[in-house]
Amino acid sequence: MSSGYALHPEAFADLDDIRGYIAQDNPDAADRVMAEIFDAIRGLVPFPYQGHRRPDLSLRPLRFTLVRDYLIAYAPDQKPLWVVAVMHGRRNPRIMAAILKGRS
């Protein structure tokens, strides 16, 4: 059975980086954050338009949802749902826009 979503190769790297950073201090917390992120992604599959738009970050038809401090960027029109990036929400918006611009 398909999961209904796919991750951009660099989104895998985003998640590895997030998990590694949190796990330095608390591996259990890292596992919880990863579980929450994947739960949120799975929750987007049946209702992909529940996220919000961020025209300040991308002119593409991406949607965004927040899990704790992490912003998940995804393409709601793609089947399976295409997760483009997972970024810390307090990053500089220019940096987030540059990251998204480089991923398709």
Image (cartoon, rainbow, N blue to C red):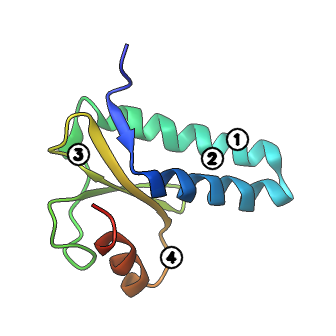
Which is more N-terminal, label 4 or label 3?
A: 3
Q: How many marks?
A: 4
Name the amino acid type tagged 4: Arg
Between the residue at mark 4 and the residue at mark 2, the CA separation in whole angstroms equals: 16 Å
* SS under mark 2: helix
* SS under mark 3: helix
Point out the image quarter for the N terminus.
top left
Residue 1: which disc? none
Judge whether 22 appears above or below 31 on screen. Answer: below
Name the amino acid type tagged 3: Gln
Mark 4, residue position? 90
Circle 1/circle 2 CB separation < 8 Å: yes
Residue 78 x, y percent position in the rendering: 19, 42
Which is more N-terminal, label 2 or label 4?
A: 2
Mark 2, residue position? 33
Q: Residue at x 48, y 65 (%)?
A: 87
Residue 50: which disc? 3
* SS under mark 1: helix
Between the residue at mark 4 and the residue at mark 1, the CA separation in whole angstroms equals: 21 Å
**Label 1: how many Cα within 10 Å (few below 14, some 14–19, many 20+):** some
Name the amino acid type tagged 1: Asp
Judge whether 10 appears above or below 97 on screen. Answer: above
The image quadrant that residue 3 belongs to is top left
Circle 3/circle 1 CB separation < 8 Å: no
